[in-house]
Amino acid sequence: MALAAIGLALGGCSAGVISVPPSEGGAWAGVSGTGGQPSNVGPAGTGGSLLNTLPTSTVPVGGAAGGTTEIVPCTDGEGCECSALSVAVIGKPGKWGADPNGDSDTALQEWLNSSSAGTAKVDNYTDRPTLTSDFLAPYGVIILASLSDDSLTGPFWTFDDSEVAAMQDWVENKGGGLITLTSYTGDGREVNPTNQLIAFSGISYNMDGIYATCMDWRACGCAHSNTLSTWIKTDPVIANLSNNVTWVGLDNGRSINAPADAHVAATVDGPKNALVGKLVGNGHVLVYADEWITYTSQWTGQGNSSENDPTCAGFLPEEDYQIAQFWYNMIKWSQPSATCFKIIDVQQPVISW
């Protein structure tokens, strides 16, 4: 139930070929930023970048012509016509996945660093940063995780009026993409700091608990999470959020209040809103009801006690859930100007749009 913040730089990238690290993963070390500084130590201590530490393969992106290819590393925009997607994850890591003591919530960071071919990079802020225009400016996407000193016990952070105004300006005027997660703890007060920061959008979390309806009990038992499966595909504004997604795990989340000018993308029985997006000025706000989509047990099986259970073969979350695609859709929707953002993942293929 945790994530920190993700940012994207804007711009357009020409067709061609980029140098892609193999999707072998790579541990995300040192997720313990202090003093408001990001902790983004990559697998080889390279500031979160895998481009210079792993072998590369040539993968066409766009429509390279004539059979000639050129390797174009897209690290921070160098050698490419657009900058890397800069993502900031703000908040404490979640502690309550399928295995409360062995289920890391760093799957998203590992995936972006190992599978984006250098078109995305992540900064983690696990200590409370001061939100100013200068702090927010480098990022195209920000992900709010557990805004607390401890994701289970708090205390929960508060933000002053200038910080709330800075976040609103970053979204409305600078075109930022804001994604929020919740349900890291049973204490409903966890929603207060996030509600503070998204109040300008008119969207807010409730303090209740919601569950998705299990669509296959063997899959739910092997994943240790129920299946979010009710997607709203008729609203063109948010239809792509469920593009090529059937199920993701949602377990004891919090429902979302959606104003009339927002767009509901997913619901659970009630009906209660589980995913709500809104276009706010030049930017996008996307509010999700849970945090299970951050745990490695739901992405790769790491930390899932059922991983080696023979009765779970074919029913494990990495087999039945489309979490990588779901995250791609959310990031892409939140920051449509990130036209160079690519995911190349052999283990969990993602369809770009």
Image (spheres, helix red, strand yellow):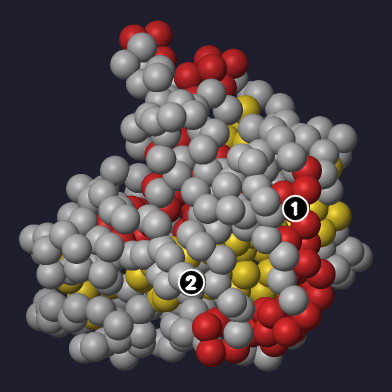
Q: Which mark is residue 191?
A: 1
- Three-letter residue code for mark 1: Val
Q: Residue 272 or 168: which is nearer the viewer?
A: 168
**What secondary structure is found at the residue carrying circle 2?**
loop
Write the residue at 40% across / 17% down: 306
The quadrant holding residue 208 is top right
- Three-letter residue code for mark 2: Gly
From this viewpoint, is residue 179 visible? Answer: yes
Q: Residues within 10 Å of mark 1 (few under 14, many from 20)?
A: many
Residue 249 rendering spot, x and y as whole percentages: 57, 35
The quadrant holding residue 143 is bottom right
Q: Which mark is residue 174?
A: none
Q: Residue 169 or 39: which is nearer the viewer?
A: 39
**What secondary structure is found at the residue carrying circle 1?**
helix
Measured in 3D between alpha carbons, the distance from the residue under mark 2 to the one under mark 1, in whole angstroms, is 21 Å
Write the residue at 28% across / 53% down: 29
Relative to 158, residue 348 above or below: above
Residue found at the very far top of the displayed protein = 311
Q: Residue 252 or 285: which is nearer the viewer?
A: 252
Relative to 259, residue 310 above or below: above
Q: Horizontal placement of 248 versus 268: left or right?
A: left
From this viewpoint, is residue 13 visible? Answer: no
Write the residue at 58% across / 53% down: 149
Residue 195 rendering spot, x and y as whole percentages: 78, 62
Whether tag 2 and tag 1 are in contact, CB under 8 A, the answer is no
Residue 253 rendering spot, x and y as whole percentages: 70, 39
Q: Horizontal placement of 285 versus 120: left or right?
A: right
What residue sits right under mark 2 in the picture? 36
What is the quadrant of the N terminus in the image?
top right
Lower sequence index among marks 2 and 1: 2
Relative to 60, residue 78 above or below: below
